[in-house]
Image (cartoon, grey):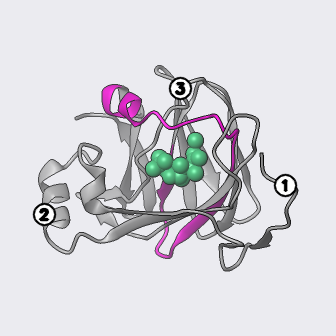
Amino acid sequence: PVPPMRIAFDAAAATLSPEGPTLTRRMSDLEGLFADHDAWRDAAEGENPVVYSVVSSPVPEEDRELPQSITTIQPGTTGGEFWMTKGHQHPNHQGEIYLGLHGAGGLLMFDGERTEWIDMAPGVIGYIPPGWAHRSVNVGDEPYSFLAVYPGGAGHDYGWVLEHGMGHRVIAGDSGFSLTDYTR
Ligand code: PA5
Ligand code: NI
């Protein structure tokens, strides 16, 4: 266990201090997730842009701890699909909360049958109940950031999403976004 600690949280800048590990996901890390595989490959083999980054607090991902992290998703689309996180299921089905910090995004959840979508904006809490896979999507034209607080033993099952999908896809349209059925 770690000692009690003070962590400075700047919601506007989307930073934590002190910081723990940081993760950066580029387009090449998102294989098999966008419907338009050719568009994905062109982007991954071309500029290979950073799609999102996750900065964590120093609280470890261990059972009974309660770590936090801030995810920032860059604005963009690939094959008409808004940039998004990989998405995952918690292997032991623990819950999680997100707090919107900056930009316009959404929290897409899928329990294997039902899809739920929560519009995320600064000040909005999105609650992920036990057993719902979750993916975040930037539907705006500036970076979208949110804080996550989760059980340290929750884990990340990315294979679940590759196998089951996320129910719906988030597609760019003339006036914002729309959700379409998941087709592979
Ligand atoms: O704990 C969470 O659910 C988030 O911190 C995510 O891990 C983060 O947004 C990155 O998404 P993913 O883990 O699906 O790549
Ligand atoms: Ni999670």
Q: Earlier in the sequence, mark 3 or mark 1?
A: 1
Tell me if 121 is positioned left or right of 166 in this view.
right
What residue is drawn where x is 24% and y is 58%?
28
- Indicate whether 21 appears above or below 119: below
Q: Position of residue 147 (x, y in %)?
A: 67, 59
Does 33 lie within the magenta span? no
Amino acid type at image mark 3: Pro
The yes-or-no answer for disc 3 within 8 Å of ligand 2 is no
User: Which element type, helix, strand or loop, lies under badge 3?
Assistant: loop
Extreme residue in the bottom direction: 13
Q: Nearer the viewer, mark 3 or mark 1?
A: 1
Q: Position of residue 88 (x, y in %)?
A: 47, 38
Q: Earlier in the sequence, mark 1 or mark 2?
A: 1
Amino acid type at image mark 2: Asp
Number of residues whose C-alpha sits closer than 10 Å to that of mark 3, classed few (under 14), some (14–19) or many (20 or more): some
- Indicate whether 62 appears above or below 164: below
Residue assigned mark 3:
91
What residue span does the magenta drawing correspond to? Answer: 135-163
Does 143 lie within the magenta span? yes
What residue is drawn where x is 20% and y is 56%?
40
Q: Earlier in the sequence, mark 2 or mark 3?
A: 2
Residue assigned mark 2:
42
- Indicate whether 182 appears above or below 44: above
Return the mark for residue 3.
1
User: Which element type, helix, strand or loop, lies under badge 1?
Assistant: loop
Number of residues whose C-alpha sits closer than 10 Å to that of mark 2, classed few (under 14), some (14–19) or many (20 or more): some
Q: Position of residue 125 (x, y in %)?
A: 74, 51
What whole-number distance in Å separates the C-alpha atoms at marks 2 and 3? Answer: 32 Å
Number of residues whose C-alpha sits closer than 10 Å to that of mark 1, classed few (under 14), some (14–19) or many (20 or more): few
In which quadrant will I find the N terminus? top right
Amino acid type at image mark 1: Pro
What whole-number distance in Å separates the C-alpha atoms at marks 3 and 1? Answer: 27 Å
